[in-house]
Amino acid sequence: MNELLAIDNLGKRFGGFVALDGISLSVRQGERVGLIGPNGSGKSTLVNCICGTLRHESGAVRFDGRRLGGAPAHRRTRLGLARTFQLPRPFASLTLLDNLRIPLLYTVAARGRGSAPEVEARGLALLREVGLEAKARLLPRDLTQVEMRKLELARAMAAEPKLLIADESMAGLTHSEVEDILALLNRLNAAGVTIILIEHIMRAVMSFSQRLVVLVSGRKIADGAPDEVMRDPQVEKAYLGQ
Amino acid sequence: MIFSFDLLVNAIVSGILIGGFYAAVTAGVSLSFGILDIVNIAHPAFVILGSYLAYVLNVSLGLDPILASIVMLPAFYALGAGIYQVYYLSFEKRGQESLRGLAFFFGLLFITEVTLVLYFGVDYRYVEARYIGPTWHLGPIDLPLRILVPFLVSLLLIAALELMLTRSFIGRAMMAVAQDQLALRLLAIDPIRVKRIAFGVSIASASLAGAFLIIIQPVEPSVGREFIGRVFAICVLGGMGSLPGTLIAAMMIGIFESLTATFYGPSWAPAVSFGFLLLTLAVRPAGLLGR
Amino acid sequence: MRSDVFFLVCLGIGAAVFAAALALGNDYLFFAGYVVAQYVVLATAWNILGGYCGYVNFGSAAFFALGAYATVALHEFYEPLPVPALIVGGGVVSGVVGLGMGYLTLRLRGAFFAIATLALAVVLQTLVVNWDYVGGSRGAYIMRPETIAPLGNYVRYLFLVMLFLAVVAVTAARVIERSRLGYGFATIRDDELAAEASGVPTLRLKLVATAISGALMGMAGAPFPYYIGFLQPSSTFGLDYAVNAIAMPLIGGTTTWVGPLIGALLLGSLQQIATVTISSAVNLLIVGFLLVGFVIVAPNGIVGLQRQYIQHKPVGLVGRRRLGADAPGSAS
C-alpha cells in the first residue's frame, strides 16, 4: 500500500505560541488512523495546516505523491483531501441539498463528472446515508446540533475524497448514533477512502482505528497500534495526569 | 517649485499641528472601530455636527467654541449611547453587523449631512474667538494660534482618553470587551453596557473634534467626507485602537499631506491619506504599533 | 423560465415602456427614465458583489465615473464614437480596474475591504481631478447631437440604450444567480472558509464578481457625459452614487436579481419626484432614512418582506458574515 499523506516536520506558531512542534506523520492508502489528544494539543491546527486553511511555517505536506506547498484549500479538496470542521460551518442561506451541491459542483463536477440531475440525485443519496433526506429542502438553522454534524460529514463526503479527516464528528451523539456514524465511516473505508478520525469518544476511536496517533502540546508522543499506544506510560500521563 | 528651507520647516510643523487635530478626530474611531470593531463611517458627520453646534452657541451666546463643545458633551454622549443601543439590537444581536451595520452607518452619514444642509445651507460657517487670527512666530516657524490651540487641546483629549483606557476600571473593561466578552460576563460585567459607554465616549469626542475643526477652518456640511478616509487610514496605520499609535500615525499623515500640498499642490492632498490607507492595508494591516 | 426566454420577455417589457414614453410625448419622462434605468444597472451591478458575495463596495461611484471619463478621453483622443461602442469601452475600462482593485483588496476581511474600496474611489477621483486631458477639476463639456432620426430628441436614444443595458444587467444577474457561479457566490457570503474547504476557488470567484460588477457600472457610466453635457469630478465621483448603489439593493432585497430592480425602480422614481417637487437635497435625506429604516426593520428588503408575510416562507439568514477574524475552528 502506498503512502497517501506524508507530513514531514510540520511547525506552526501563533506569535510566540508554538501550536505544532515538528509533527511527522505518514498515512497509507486505505488506512484508518485515529488522532487523539487533550484539548489544545493542536489537533485542529494540524488539520487546518494539512488542508490549507492555515499556512504552516516549517515542514512539508505531501499528498498523493505531490508536494502541497502553498496550495489553497480548494485545490487540496479537489485533489481529494476533505475535512469536516469541529464546529459545524454549514452554508446558512442554502438548503441542505444545496449545501451538498456545492462540493458536488465544485469538486466532483470539476473533475468532469456530473450533470444537474446527477448532482441532485447524488446529493439526495448522500443525505439518505446520513439520515437527513427528509430535511433536504430545509435550512441548516432548522437542524439540531447533531444533525448539523451529520450534514458536515455529508458535505465532506460529497467531495468524493481520497482522504477524509473527520474532526470530532461524533460529539454529542447518542450511543446508537455513534454506531451509525462508525458504520458509515467503515463503509467509506471499505470503498477505498482513507480516514483520519479525530475524536474524544475513546471506544469509537479504539474500535475504528488500525493505528492511533497521540498529540500533546503540539508534539506527537505516540504512533502505533491502539492497544500498545494506550498502554504507553506517556499517553497515560497525558490523559490521567501524574 | 522653489525649494526653501523655511517652506519645508513650516510644512512639517504645520503637518504636526494638523496631525494632532487629526488624532482628536480619529480618537473616536479608534474607540469604535479599533476597540469595538464597529465600522462607524458616520463619525466625521458627527464631527461636523459638533462644528455646527459649536458655531450656533458661538454666534448666539458668544461662547468660546471649545467651551461650547464641552457643554455639548453630555448630549453627544447620549446620542452615541442611543445609536449603539439601536445598532446592538438591530445588528449585533442578529449577527448581521457586516453588510447591514455598514449600511446603517452609511445611512446615518447621509441623514446627518443632509439635515445640516437643509438647516444651515451650503455656505461656509466660521466661529469667532480671540485666538483665531493671531500667529506666533518662533524664528522662521509660523504658529497660527487657530491651529496651535486646537492642537494643544487635542493632545489633552488624547491623554485623557488614554488615561481612561489604561487606568480607569471602565476603560480597562472596554479593552477587555474587545478581547473576550465571555470573560467579562463571568466577572459580572455587562459587555453591552461597556460597549454602550465606549461608543458614547466615542461620539462625545466628536463634539470636541468638531469645535477644533471649525476653529481651524470654515465648515460646510460635506467637509466631513474628506475625513472618512483620513480617519480610517490613521486608525489602521496607528494599530487599531492604540491611542499613542493614532497620534503618531495622525502626525505622519498630517506631515505628508502638508508636504504634498506645499510642494505639489493641494489638489493632490486627498490622495495622500487614502493612498496611505491602501498601502497600509496591503502591506501591514496590523499598523505601525499593531496589536 | 429559461434565460433566453426571460431575456426576450424583458426586452418586450422594455420596448413597451419605451413605446409608452413615446406616446406620452413629454421629454422629461425620458430624462427621468434614463436615470431610473441607470440606477437599475448600478444597483444590479453592486448586488453581484455586495449581495451575492457579501463584499460591500463603497466605491461604486468610481467605476461609474471611470466609464464616463473613458468616454470623455476617447472624445479627446479620437472622435465621437457611437454610444454602444462607448458602453463597451467603458465596461472594459471599469472591468479591468475592478479586477485590479479586487486583486489589491479582496484578501482583506469584510470591513477593511469596504474601507479600501472607498479609499480607491478617492484615489481615482484625485487622479482624474489632476488629469487636465479630461478637464480636471474644471470639468469637461461633451456636445451631444440635438436629435437623432427617427426618434427625435437625442435623449430618447439615450433612454433606449440605457433600457437595453438594464435588461442585459438584470438578465445577467439572473443567469449568474442560477448558475454554479451563483452558488459559489452564496458560499462566499455565508462562510468563506467552509467554501474553500468544499472546493470553491473563492479568490477567483471574488475577482470575477468584482470585474463583472465594475464592468456593468462602467457601462452605466459611459453614456453619462452625453446625458449631462458637463462632467464634473466632484459630482460624478460623488458619494450620492455610492449611497444609492447600496441603498437600492438593500431596500429591495440582496439575495436575488429582483431586489435591486425593485429598489432601483422605487427609490429612483421617488428621488426623481422629490427632486422636481421639493429639492434635490431632500432626495438624499429620503434615501438615508429609507436605508437606515429598512436595514433595521426589514434586513432582507422588500423581497424578504414578501417572502415572510405573503408567502410565509422561512427567511434564511442572508448575509451572515462576521466582521471579525474568521478563525478556523477553535484550538484543539
Image (cartoon, coloured by chain):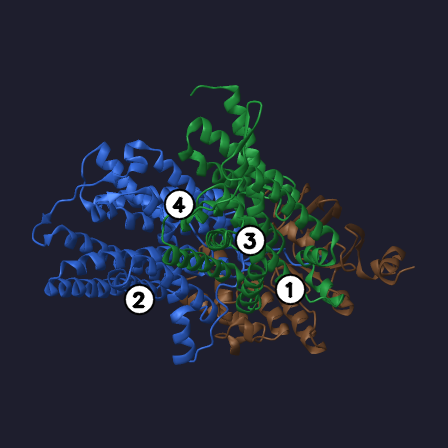
Chain colours: A brown, B green, C blue
**Badge nearest the viewer, 3 or 1:** 3
The chain carrying label 1 is A
CA distance separating discs 3 and 1? 49 Å
Q: Quadrant of the N terminus of chain C?
A: bottom left
In this figure, which residue is indicated by the disc labeled 2? C266
Element at label 1: loop
Find residue C82 and report its image quarter. top left
Element at label 4: helix
Residue B143 spot, x, y in % from top left: 55, 31
Image position of C61 (left or right of B181) = left
Residue C261 vs residue C152, the one in the foreground: C152
Residues at marks 3 and 1, common chain? no
Residue C216 vs residue A131, the one in the foreground: C216
The chain carrying label 4 is C
What type is the residue that disc 2 sits on? Leu
Residue C301 spot, x, y in % from top left: 41, 68
Dot 4 or dot 2, earlier in sequence: 4
In this figure, which residue is indicated by the disc labeled 1? A87
Marks 2/1 in contact by CB < 8 Å: the verdict is no
CA distance separating discs 2 and 3? 40 Å
Marks 4/3 in contact by CB < 8 Å: the verdict is no
In this figure, which residue is indicated by the disc labeled 3? B69
Image position of A198 (left or right of B25) = right
CA distance separating discs 2 and 1? 42 Å
* Picture residue at 60% right of the left edge, 63% below the top: A191
Residue A239 vs residue B132, the one in the foreground: B132
Residue A122 spot, x, y in % from top left: 49, 68
Q: Is residue C169 in sight in this rendering?
A: no
In this figure, which residue is indicated by the disc labeled 4? C98
